[in-house]
Amino acid sequence: MRRGRDVAALVRAARDGDPRAVARLISLVEDADPALPEVAAALTDHAGTAQVIGLTGSPGVGKSTTTNELVRALRARGRRVGVLAVDPSSPFTGGAILGDRVRMQDHATDAGVYIRSMSSRGHLGGLAAATPQAVRVLEGAGCDVVLVETVGVGQAEVEVASLADTTLVLLAPGMGDAIQAVKAGILEIADIFVVNKADRDGADATYRDIQGSIALGERQPGDWRPTVLRSVASRAEGVDDILAAIDKHHDWLVEHGELARRREARAAAEIEGIALATLRSRISSLRDGTALPKLASAVAGGELDPYTAARNLLDGLEVQGT
């Protein structure tokens, strides 16, 4: 591949709304292609332009249906929308199980919507490791709003909060004790709670449980108090209320300087992730050499402690990097 010309051409095509160019750029990100630093550099001028909204919650609460209806409502506002739906990895192929695309066929022919299913590839936290860079690609492609839907496999899918400007946690009656849903960090990451399938028995109890949990939380004056809403996404009920709450939260973020702080924290996490991946790659390359096996042998034989061995390894990496 002729990197310089091809990457520049891909970015220009993506900016012009070519879905194939967007798909190719995200594939480069997912595959950790050697051209990735060049892609990131080409997208720099377009970074930080999109509103990033995260959706998480347990399986079956209606994340994909809610995302579908949010896309519809945002398109009615004339917004260009990108969707990153992180799906579980197939245990056989390692690819994404494309359940989200099945539910979003309504927008398949809309040039103002780009939907990408991404495989989690075993990455924990509800997202794929490549998600932050994929968000950058969609920003570069001119998306005004990027919706990021997590895998949603349990209580630990809190990584989305470090990526999104606004995080929605979806719940549904009949999915178990609502208090369980706000444990393990979920209460802390939610900017907006949505009790979906609110036409079912138990919806009022779920709503009250979440409100009670929020009331027990510690907040400073001026802190954002999570909003709790009801919806029936399958009938598009409550979607306007969700968008209104997202708008209100965005205004609060801007007014209190929290939007800039969150995006700086996102950038810091992204830089750290890239640096750690580079470091892991260099250490992995040493496994085929002599440095790491020698150090491991010395530690196993009681000739060296592991901290000294680690320092020696890092010193070797510094020399290698110069």
Image: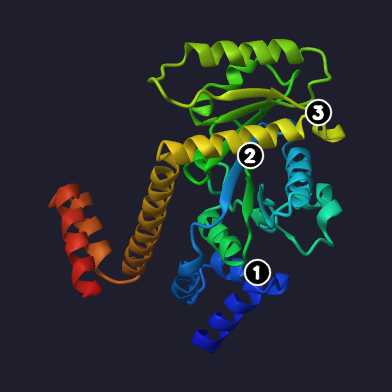
For marks 2 and 1, the one nearer the N-term is 1
Q: Label 2 crowding class (10 Å Cα cut-off): few <14, some 14-19, many 20+? A: many
For the residue marked with disc 3, what is the amino acid? Val
Where is mark 2, residue-wise?
A: 55
76 sits to left or right of 219:
right
Q: Secondary structure at mark 2?
A: strand
Q: Residue 214 in the image: state x and y as whole percent.
A: 53, 16
Residue 208 visible from this viewpoint: yes
Give, as a three-letter code, the residue at label 2.
Leu
Crowd tier of the residue under label 3, counting other residues whose Cα lies within 10 Å: few below 14, some 14–19, many 20 or above: many
Which image quadrant for residue 151?
top right
Q: Is there CB contact under 8 Å for labels 1 and 3? A: no
Residue at mark 2 to residue at mark 1: CA–CA distance: 22 Å
Q: Quadrant of the C terminus?
A: bottom left
- Labelled pair 2, 1 in contact (Cβ < 8 Å): no
- Please give the name of the residue rendered at 25% of the width and 73% of the height, measured from the top-left corner: 321
Q: Gap between marks 1 and 3, in whole Å?
A: 32 Å
Residue to which mark 1 is pinned:
22
Q: Amino acid at mark 1?
A: Val
| Residue under the image location 60 percent in, 61 percent down | 138
Q: Is residue 157 something one can see in this rendering?
A: no
Q: Quadrant of residue 175?
A: top right
Locate the N terminus by quadrant: bottom right
Query: Measured from the top left, where is residue 146 in percent x and y?
Result: 62, 52
Residue designated by label 3:
232
Q: Is residue 29 above or below residue 199?
A: below
Residue 299 place in picture, x, y as percent: 20, 51
